[in-house]
Amino acid sequence: MEEKGEQKHKFEMSRRNFLRAGATATALGVIGAIKAPVKVANAAVPSNVKFSAGAAGQWSKLHPEPDYGGATVRYAENNDQWLGTSKIVGTVKNISEADMGFALAARGLISDKAQRGFFNFVPKHPFGGAISWARTWIASEDAVDGQPAPEKLPIPDPEQMSQHIKDAAYFLRADEVGIGKMPPYAYYSHKIINPALLVHNPVEQCVKPFTERLPYVIVVMVDQHLETMLASTGYDGISASQSMRSYHATGNIAIILAKYIRSLGYHARAHHAANYGAVMGPCILASGLGELTRTGDCALHPRLGFRHKVAAVTTDLPLVPDKPIDFGLQDFCRVCGKCADNCPSGAITHDKDPVEHNGYLRWNTDMKKCTEFRVANEEGSSCGRCMKVCPWNSKENSWFHQAGLFIGSHGETSSKFLKSIDDMFGYGTEQIEKYKWWLEWPELYKVAPGLPPNPAAPPATSK
Amino acid sequence: MGTILVFVAGVLFLAGILFIKPRAKCELMWKTVLNWSLYVVWYAITWIGISFVYINFNVGHVKATSTAIFLFLGISVVLAIALARLLGFIGVKKISNTTVQV
């Protein structure tokens, strides 16, 4: 009896122990619930691809959370009224590549100097020319497009495949990657066959229709190099090289991703600076990688600013698109205007608010003035002064810049405060000499005296 | 270097607590709270400044470095003087060789 009583006593539980046991069980339950989606998700993975999925909702396995550098980021919409924070107020028409800034320069619609300048503004600096030359090797139709493999390989479900594609991009050295629902109006209506044709021929003979329409876009982003930007004026000899660096890097990533997706049995086309079929601005917004800025069609990423270039892959691979993002940039650009104050061509508007342009609202930047300065700049090669001075762009990764981005993403008053601090500390307008690693040849920076021959013309025959 | 600075900051924070503890406690509670609050704020501002100057100097932001030295050092000195006065390290009248009056 005594033994039985002892046993009974052993199984008695005080109120404190009861609560402890309850708390432990709850904690275990929560942990189980958090882990469960992974198991459920893994159940959907074909066993022969040997892939263990990340948790549901995770950005990717290599980067479980997207890195927004301290900014407070909210999700926005991608529908017929909004693309992120850009308001759609009418019909956004598909535009022709021949109506973009550089094409207008090549067609002689900006100025004679700009037309001549277009054909040598990058290669006049030997380093920029070298990177640009490398870019042309990945520009052919065979490099960017092709037929998908006849049989589809087994792949994980769309969410896991999205994580996998992002990790593939990070593996290929992308700084950022996002997946979007491809806005149909982001495609060019026509693309240029060869820019040199534009000089001598009617525009209709220089373009071909671009008819591809795929549901998703993968955007890869590569930084234009912080230290180089800190040492540069923004419009010296290295400026075009910075663009070419990121164009080349993103182009390489895009053509590899596209080829990989085609090998899995799905359609995929790479779009990069040497062979675009789409406008990158709306692709960036749709992929949750930025918002439009005061500079017009440049999209700014919360961490990288717009010190980046992107390339894209359009595809019908089953994916889960990310949502566009809102981190208060429209309020920030409204009160800052530092890019407009520092633009050497005066192309960036000082207007308070965006205006309608092709069916959507954007700041009314003068694309022709900007293009003319970039192609005819005789102090260097191209220009990225706006990129250098923007308070979101010109920073190393540190706790106080993260704090700055947090402040800058919280409305007009805090944006004014951030801009004042940025000016007080002299960020953006300084040149840090210790990082100036490149060579300058000012005697080479003259605009080309003539125009290239007509590629369509028959080659001259010798007697 | 960053790790060393964090370590040094932690050690000095604790040392500071031990150093001012005998003088921080006052008969009025709000004065005690004021002393400790001021100590924490002064210490935080000082090390935010040191960290800010250290990072900006290393990256090469000349104007940010010099501005931060004036700004954070200035605030730090003002707070330090106020704290020293409240704790009785400065500004006390000696009434004899052995006693001090706060």
Image (cartoon, coloured by chain):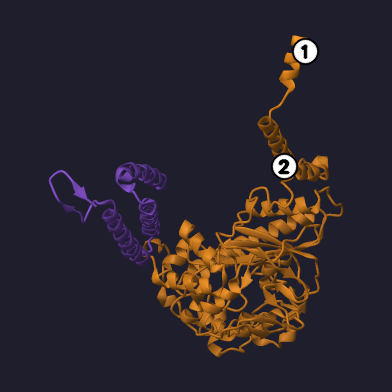
Chain colours: A orange, B purple
Marks 2 and 1 sit apart, C-alpha to C-alpha, by 37 Å
Secondary structure at numbered mark 2: helix
Query: x and y percent of residue A435 in the render?
Result: 40, 61
Q: Which residue is mark 2?
A: A30
**Which chain is disc 1 placed on?**
A
Which corner quadrant of the image does residue A427 belong to? bottom left
Residue drawn at (71%, 57%), measured in percent from left and top? A257
Q: Nearer the viewer, residue A453 or B16?
A: B16
Looking at the image, tell me whether mark 2 or mark 1 is earlier in sequence order: 1
- Residue farthest along the front direction in this orientation: B27
What's the mark number on residue B60? none
Residue drawn at (63%, 56%), measured in percent from left and top? A66
Which corner quadrant of the image does residue A184 belong to? bottom right
Tell me the crowding category of disc 1: few under 14, some 14 to 19, or many 20 or more residues within 10 angstroms, Cα based: few
Query: x and y percent of residue A143 in the render?
Result: 71, 62
Say if mark 2 contacts mark 1, CB within 8 Å.
Answer: no
Residue drawn at (65%, 69%), measured in percent from left and top? A274
- Residue farthest along the left direction in this orientation: B97
Q: Is residue A170 left or right of residue A414?
A: right
The answer to whether residue A11 of the structure is visible from this angle is: yes
Secondary structure at numbered mark 1: helix
The answer to whether marks 2 and 1 sit on the same chain is yes
Residue type of the residue flagged with mark 1: Lys
- Residue farthest along the right direction in this orientation: A151
Q: Which residue is mark 1?
A: A4
Above or below residue A46? Residue A360 is below
Residue type of the residue flagged with mark 2: Val
Above or below residue A446? Residue A417 is above
The N terminus of chain A sits in image quarter: top right
**Which chain is disc 2 placed on?**
A
